[in-house]
Amino acid sequence: MNMILFMITLSLALTITLTALNFWLAQMNPDSEKLSPYECGFDPLGSARLPFSIRFFLVAILFLLFDLEIALLLPLPWATQLQHPTITLIWASALILLLTLGLIYEWAQGGLEWAE
């Protein structure tokens, strides 16, 4: 219990120290050059604070969702060394089937269309 309390106290002290140091050492003098958007040396043509299309975020979330499939299926080659590899392969097939059905659903709903 003493070790856990020590680690929590040390972590808290280090966090507070580094946060205070960051606020103390940070340069808080923004000028117009730092606040202007960078556009390859040209003067900004419009506002840099325009919102992105929601399609961009939808495609990014879909990419992350289907990219997790790789992380979940990566240990499959080692499944052949288990006592019952068929159970693991059944679960992997179910995962692939579920993700494929999700992809078909998104495609049918038009979620993958970039331009309307």
Image (cartoon, rainbow, N blue to C red):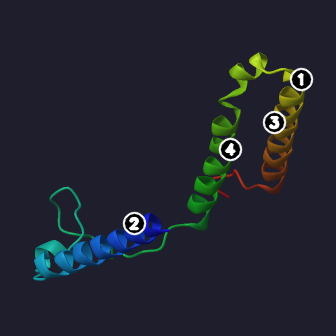
Residue 49 placement (x, y as % from top left): 37, 76
* Count of numbered labels shown in the rendering: 4
Instruction: Using the numbered discs, state the Cα–Cα distance from disc 4 to disc 2 in whole angstroms.
Output: 37 Å
Q: Residue at x 84, y 51 (%)?
A: 105
- Name the secondary structure under disc 1: helix
Three-letter residue code for mark 4: Phe
Residue 30 placement (x, y as % from top left): 13, 80
Q: Residue at x 77, y 17 (%)?
A: 80
The residue under label 3 is 96
Mark 3 and mark 1 in contact? Answer it, CB < 8 Å.
no
Three-letter residue code for mark 1: Thr
Q: Is residue 35 left or right of residue 86?
A: left
- Name the secondary structure under disc 4: helix
For residue 87, which quarter of the picture? top right
For residue 39, which quarter of the picture? bottom left
Q: Residue at x 80, y 43 (%)?
A: 99
Mark 4 and mark 1 in contact? Answer it, CB < 8 Å.
no
Residue 60 higher or lower than 10, as above or below: above
Asked whether 45 or 13 is in front, the reply is 13
The residue under label 1 is 86
Instruction: Using the numbered discs, state the Cα–Cα distance from disc 3 to disc 1 in whole angstroms.
Output: 15 Å
Going from the N terminus, do you reach mark 4 or mark 2 first?
2
Question: Which disc is residue 67 wearing?
Answer: none
Three-letter residue code for mark 2: Met
Residue 25 placement (x, y as % from top left): 11, 76
User: In this rendering, which labeled residue sits more in front, label 3 or label 2?
Assistant: 2
Going from the N terminus, do you reach mark 4 or mark 1 first?
4
The residue under label 4 is 66
Question: Which disc is residue 7 wearing?
Answer: 2
Asked whether 81 or 66 is in front, the reply is 81
